[in-house]
């Protein structure tokens, strides 16, 4: 009884640790990959797992350390298992299914990158061959090349019967390079390109492809719109006030625009992603302001443009220097001096009027002044208006007195007093003369 139990344990023990993992893909029916009771290294597992995974035979889970077994059930219900023993040698072992000894029945287990001729009758050592593989090393897929001459480099593995390599860029003709593993394509234009490398053997061919971008030029960028708040004060004058909005267009034939940045004057750059408009808010002093836009492509190349706006939110300043308000002038000729300024768009012109008469344009270049002549004695008012480019205006005024009389203040009484004094002097002289004449 104990002998029978030992035989049963030894018979079933090799299958006690098998945990089938279902695979999916093309090939023979009911193919699975199972973890085996024996252990192997991670390197062995991942090498075989890679071959299975490339064709769709993907295990549900990936054990950390397992011996990989490929389990095949063919039409005659013969079961064999394939698992690694050395780098390229694999044992073939008969399973527990109802194996029928019908001679040396040959079956082929085919998986891209891994196949073996399996003879179900024997358990001898067979050889598994690894299919050739081709991989482009440079340029990287989705990579960026910053020159027009691009060198393609690749590697072929497990190649024993190579005939030649072929290379094609975009839709050009195939170029045979023999057994060389590099090829340079010259004068490629900025933009997206695809390179295909082909490995041709005695029995088959293999290809690999990579898409890359040539980027030798910076982006193109221009400002195409702006907006703001306008206040109009005269028919031909308006002021631009914040907020200021700008819009732009950017293109890059090479690698494409990665992001945009904006800033005002010497402020910090603001990353706005791939948006093509931005509104500047906040306080802005009167005067000229620059609004910048920068485009940065995927290779780091950049282009910067700007537009200048003049903010004019304040009135111009105006000051009459002479005559001073309240002054008394002894001449009928009065010279008016003034000073005007504007931090916004600047002074457009000056207008002047005397004693609430009509406004008249006056020149304001250099040291501005205006001369009034023939002013009558008495009180006068001069008003001076400064108008800036936006149409904003401001007025300064002075009131003064003209007194050309030599004795007292201006007016008829002074003249009458002078006449009366003169008459009195004449009368006195005449009286004295007659008195002297009578005595004689």
Image: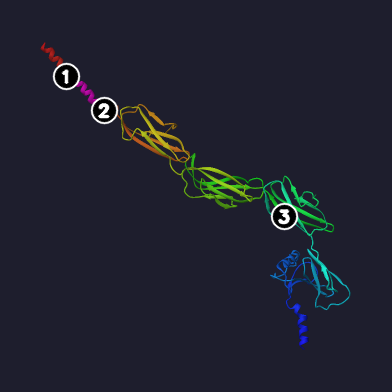
Image position, residue 435 (x, y; %): 12, 15
Camera-side residue: 213 or 122?
122
Q: Where is residue 416 in the image (x, y as percent from the top left)?
A: 24, 25
> Dot 1 corresponds to which residue?
428
Residue 436's place in the image compared with 49, above or below, is above
Q: Which of marks 3 and 2 is in front?
A: 3
Q: Mark 3 points at which residue?
A: 137
Decide which of 341, 408 is in the foreground and name it. 341
Comparing marks 3 and 1, which lies closer to the viewer? 3
Q: What stretch is highlighted in magenta?
A: 415-428
Whether 427 is among the magenta residues is: yes
Residue at left offset 26%, top offset 25%: 406
Categorize mark 3 by other alpha carbons within 10 Å: few (<14), some (14-19), many (20+).
few
Q: Can residue 423 be seen in this view?
A: yes
Which residue occupies 18% across, 19% down?
Answer: 427
Dot 2 surroundings within 10 Å: few (below 14), some, or many (20 or more)?
few
The residue indicated by pointer 2 is 412
Disc with the residue nearer the chain's start (1 vs 2): 2
Out of 322 and 53, give the one closest to the viewer.
53
Disc 1 from disc 2: Cα separation: 24 Å
C-alpha span from label 3 to label 1: 132 Å
Residue reaching furthest bottom?
1
* Quarter containing the N terminus: bottom right
Q: In this view, does 184 lie above or below 413?
A: below
Q: Is mark 1 on a helix, strand or loop?
A: helix
């Amino acid at each position: 009884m104990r002998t029978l139990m030992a035989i049963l344990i030894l018979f079933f023990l090799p299958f006690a640790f098998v945990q089938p993992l279902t695979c999916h893909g093309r090939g023979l029916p009911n193919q699975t990959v199972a973890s085996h009771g024996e252990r192997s290294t991670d390197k062995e597992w991942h090498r075989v797992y890679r071959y299975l995974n490339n064709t769709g035979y993907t295990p549900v889970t990936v054990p950390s350390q397992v011996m990989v077994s490929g389990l095949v059930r063919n039409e005659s219900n013969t079961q064999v298992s394939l698992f690694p023993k050395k780098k390229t040698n694999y044992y073939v072992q008969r399973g527990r299914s109802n194996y029928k000894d019908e001679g040396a029945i040959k079956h082929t287990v085919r998986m891209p990158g891994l196949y073996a001729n399996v003879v179900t009758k024997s358990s001898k050592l067979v050889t598994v061959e690894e299919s050739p593989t081709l991989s482009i090393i440079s340029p990287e897929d989705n990579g960026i090349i910053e020159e027009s001459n691009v060198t393609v480099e690749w590697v072929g593995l497990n190649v024993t019967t190579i005939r030649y390599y072929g290379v094609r860029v975009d839709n050009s003709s195939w170029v045979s390079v023999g057994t060389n593993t590099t090829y340079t394509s010259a004068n490629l234009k900025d933009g997206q390109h695809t390179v295909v490398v082909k490995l041709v053997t005695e029995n088959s061919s293999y290809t690999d492809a990579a898409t890359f971008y040539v980027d030798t030029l910076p982006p193109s960028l221009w400002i195409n719109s702006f907006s703001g708040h306008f206040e109009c004060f005269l028919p031909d004058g308006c002021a631009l006030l914040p907020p200021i909005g700008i819009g732009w267009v950017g293109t890059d034939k090479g690698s494409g625009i990665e992001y945009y940045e904006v800033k005002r004057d010497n402020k910090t750059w603001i990353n706005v992603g791939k948006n093509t408009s931005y509104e500047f808010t906040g306080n802005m002093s009167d005067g000229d302001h620059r609004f910048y836009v920068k485009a940065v492509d995927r290779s780091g190349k950049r282009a910067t443009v700007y537009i200048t706006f003049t903010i004019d939110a304040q009135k111009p300043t105006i000051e009459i220097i002479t005559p001073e308000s309240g002054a008394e002038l002894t001449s009928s000729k009065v010279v008016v001096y003034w000073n005007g300024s504007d931090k916004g768009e600047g002074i457009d012109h000056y207008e002047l009027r005397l004693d609430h008469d009509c406004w008249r344009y006056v020149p304001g270049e250099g040291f501005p002044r205006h001369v009034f002549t023939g002013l009558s004695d008495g009180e006068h008012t001069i008003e001076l208006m400064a108008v800036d480019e936006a149409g904003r205006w401001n007025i300064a005024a002075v009131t003064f007195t003209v007194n050309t009389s030599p004795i007292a203040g201006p007016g008829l009484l002074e003249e009458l007093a002078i006449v009366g004094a003169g008459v009195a002097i004449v009368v006195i002289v005449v009286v004295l003369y007659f008195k002297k004449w009578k005595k004689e």
